Image: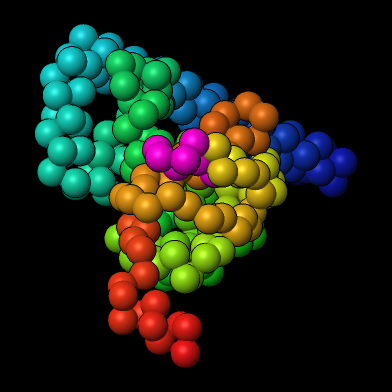
């Protein structure tokens, strides 16, 4: 008969064996999982590099596809391709910078219900929502006069009003106004002017100190009709 002490020692030994076996199994599983994860990550990296290499080797074909979509105004699809160019460090390929700016401006105008409602907070929020990398470009909008508007000389002075916005701030007070007929008209967010008779192309130019933006509108200045002159005299 085994003594109680011997029995206890055997039980302890068996427990240690079982514990060691379980511990070894867990450690082995952990090592295998880590090894599998490492292999998986390495395979993913190799696959990503392969896709990148393939994209860059065919970059001109992708650019041609982007251009076709851009000309067709399929801007959502263009943005998806632009993201890939950005991802692989080709964000400045050929004229992508200009295309991104044009699309960004298109969506800004589309999202804003009407130009007179534009303010700095809306502009910055919309800039964040449009999923193209942010830039420091200056966007200029002419609020009034509207394109193609006619004025008589009796309407003078004519009010010009615009905004110049950037993610860096509101630079509307620095807008420079000019006419293709009368030259430089003045500076400011609002400007009252008297223009020569004729068809004017009014240009508003704004800058944030780093970039410059412009917007143009066309208005017509005519002499007061004779019947209107008589009416005004009376």
Magenta stretch: residue 100 in it?
no
Residue 15: where, in percent of width, then height?
71, 40
Q: In this view, does 206 lie to the left or right of 12?
A: left
Q: In which quarter of the image is the N terminus?
A: top right
Which residue: 56% across, 64% down?
157
Question: Who is closer to the viewer here, 211 or 159?
Answer: 159
Examine the rendering and report whether any part of residue 222 can be seen: yes
Q: Is residue 32 left or right of residue 150?
A: right
Reply above or below: 89 against 22.
above
Which residue: 39% across, 66% down?
151
Question: Who is closer to the viewer here, 1 or 13?
Answer: 13
Which residue: 65% across, 44% down?
187
Q: Which colour scheme is used?
A: rainbow
Question: Who is closer to the viewer here, 153 or 86?
Answer: 153
Residue 74: where, in percent of width, then height?
19, 47
Question: Who is closer to the viewer here, 177 or 103?
Answer: 177
Q: Is residue 163 left or right of residue 188?
A: left
Which residue sits furthest right?
A: 5
Residue 29: where, in percent of width, then height?
51, 32
Reply above or below: 143 against 60.
below
Examine the rendering and report whether any part of residue 50 can be seen: no
Which quadrant of the view contains residue 201?
Answer: top left
The number of numbered discs placed on residues in the rendered structure image is: 0
Magenta stretch: residue 179 in it?
yes
Which residue: 43% across, 50% down?
196
Which residue sits furthest bottom?
A: 234
Q: In this view, does 57 lie to the left or right of 216?
A: left
What segment carries the magenta color? 177-183
Residue 102: where, in percent of width, then height?
35, 39
């Amino acid at each position: 008969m085994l003594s109680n002490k011997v029995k206890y020692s055997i039980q302890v030994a068996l427990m240690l064996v079982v514990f060691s076996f379980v511990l070894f199994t867990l450690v082995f599983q952990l090592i295998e999982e880590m090894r599998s994860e490492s292999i998986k990550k390495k395979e993913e990296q190799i696959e990503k590099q392969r896709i990148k290499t393939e994209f860059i080797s065919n970059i001109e074909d992708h650019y041609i596809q982007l251009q076709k979509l851009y000309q067709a105004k399929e801007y959502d699809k263009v943005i998806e391709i632009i993201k890939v160019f950005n991802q692989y460090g080709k964000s400045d390929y050929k004229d992508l910078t200009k295309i991104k700016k044009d699309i960004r401006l298109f969506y800004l105008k589309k999202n804003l219900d009407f130009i007179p409602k534009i303010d700095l907070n809306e502009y910055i929020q919309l800039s964040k929502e449009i999923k193209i990398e942010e830039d420091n470009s200056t966007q200029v909008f002419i609020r009034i006069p509207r394109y193609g508007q006619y004025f008589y000389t009796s309407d003078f002075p004519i009010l010009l009003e615009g905004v110049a916005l950037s993610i860096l701030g509101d630079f509307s007070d620095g807008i420079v106004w000019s006419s293709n007929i009368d030259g430089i008209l003045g500076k400011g967010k609002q400007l009252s002017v008297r223009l020569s008779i004729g068809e004017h192309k009014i240009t508003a130019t704004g800058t944030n100190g780093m970039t410059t933006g412009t917007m143009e509108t066309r208005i017509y200045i005519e002499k007061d009709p004779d019947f209107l002159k008589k009416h005004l005299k009376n």
